[in-house]
Amino acid sequence: MMKSWNVRDQTEETLKTLLEKKYKEIEADYKLIRKIADVNTAKKMLDEIYQAKAFANAIELELIRRGFYNGTTSQ
């Protein structure tokens, strides 16, 4: 049985790389959404952007928490 992905199980370097990648995706999606003419497609794109932003926020929160506790994780 495989363990599900968890933000707390990742290294700090992995989280920083993933966070940078997510923000690039979000910026690209915002640029793309300006070009979409169909309202329903735009709504779907916004939902995807908000999900990506929520994921990025979880990563940022974990990085802040690690910095607060001097880089140690509480398990």
Image (tube, rainbow, N blue to C red):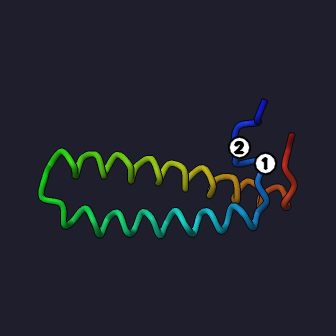
Q: Nearer the viewer, residue 35 or 7?
A: 35
CA–CA distance in space, label 2 to label 1: 5 Å
As displayed, is residue 9 above or below residue 2? below
Question: Tags 2 and 1 in contact by the CB under 8 Å rule?
Answer: yes
Question: From this viewpoint, which residue is outermost toward the top?
Answer: 1
Measured as percent of width and height from the top left, residue 35 is found at 19, 66
As displayed, is residue 24 above or below residue 54? below
Is 18 on the left or on the right of 37, as rendered? right
Is 70 on the left or on the right of 3, as rendered? right
In the rendered structure, which amino acid carries the disc numbered 2? Asn
As displayed, is residue 61 above or below residue 75? below
Residue drawn 67% across and 67% down? 16
Secondary structure state at the residue bearing disc 1: helix
The residue to which callout 1 is attached is 9
In the rendered structure, which amino acid carries the disc numbered 1? Asp
The residue to which callout 2 is attached is 6
Measured as percent of width and height from the top left, residue 44 is found at 28, 46
Image quarter in which the N terminus is found: top right
Measured as percent of width and height from the top left, residue 54 is found at 50, 48
